[in-house]
Amino acid sequence: MAFAWVFLLIAAGCIAANTDSSASALPLKTLEHSSRDFRTRRMNLLTLYSPFYVSEGNESHNNRTWSALTSWEKLVPRSHIILFTEDSRSCSWLRANGFDGIRCLLTCTHPQIPRQDIGCMTSTAVNIARTPFLCMINSDILMMPNFKEVFNRVFLEEEDLKEPFMVGRRTNLLQNVRTDFTSQGWPARVLQDARENGDMDGVCAIDYFVHTRTVWDYVTMPGFVAGVWRWDRYLLSEANRHDRITTVDATEAFTAVHLQTEEYLPHQARPYHDFNTQVLLMYQGLELNDEGASFCFPKKKNSCALSNSRMGTNKNKTLRTL
């Protein structure tokens, strides 16, 4: 196991293209960097990938996307950000707003619904990323700089973890304008705003999942559609139930700020929300309550919840809270 980690942590390359209609796999031998890069540029080991779209005429929506992407590029090189969309206008928006170098893929549209297929996204990202670690994240999540410290602790410093899988609950914050990144004090301002005016979402409201390249060897990701509920609780509960995976709850260590606008729709009011519910029932057989499944309890095991910022109980599992 230790030898495998040493091999994978040789570091990351870069992806140069802006817009692609397809993606091809890269051999693992391309995961090359010097040991000096490993020590001094650790976020070169991570690729962020996300479903993505812009809304013509909806500046509030586009402002939160701009803010999220700007915070991401402060953590990782632009070449380590992969966005999935079904609309070429979204890729054009990236270039028009100065995000050259971010990879925009016109692929993984669901075969039944005009949204991204999350199962396709996960496999495609692993195939084309040149980094040993990846993070599936929603494109309205503002990333704080201390994410780097939390990432390093979980994936580079904790030697006794099994297959680490880092998640955390989101804090909702109403924001219609672009975040001001012009001063070094922006993280403190955003966090203060989130504490005073935001609210932490439910126990299964998870908008980022940091994982190794091999986690999908143990967890099957069905064809959920992006932009509506259910897929996050499915993924969390599946990870919690697998003995090979160590789920790490980073809620208390890292604040994932979920930017919302005044037009933000609850998931049960969004198109295609019933589709994901049916996929969830098909794969996990969950008993959903009238409130829309505040928790995800499989029939035989209580394996989901981040209850009180701690992971659910599976007595044969290793679960960590930072």
Image: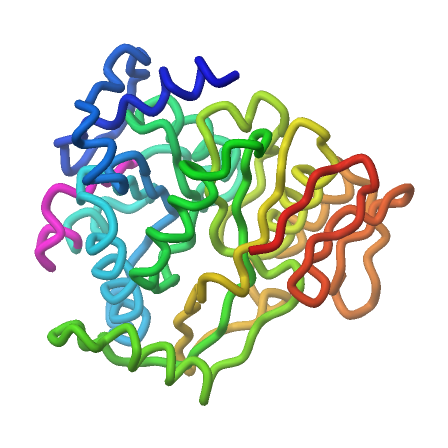
Give the percent coordinates (x, y) of residue 199.
54, 79
Q: How is the image coloured?
A: rainbow
Give the percent coordinates (x, y) of residue 149.
36, 53
Is residue 61 shown above or below 10? below
Q: Which segment did they paint magenta?
A: 94-106
User: Is 98 within the magenta?
Assistant: yes
Pick the residue in front: 53 or 136: 136
Q: Would residue 221 appear left or right of 7 to someone viewing this image?
A: right
* Residue displayed at 43% across by 68% down: 258
Give the percent coordinates (x, y) of residue 107.
34, 33
User: Is 114 within the magenta?
Assistant: no
Pick the residue in front: 17 or 113: 17
Q: Would residue 122 appear left or right of 239 to someone viewing this image?
A: left
Visible residue check, residue 94:
yes
Is residue 44 shown above or below 168? above
Q: Would residue 256 appear left or right of 185 to someone viewing this image?
A: right
Pick the residue in front: 203 or 262: 203
Please state, as top left, top right, bottom left or bottom right, where the C terminus lies in the image: bottom right
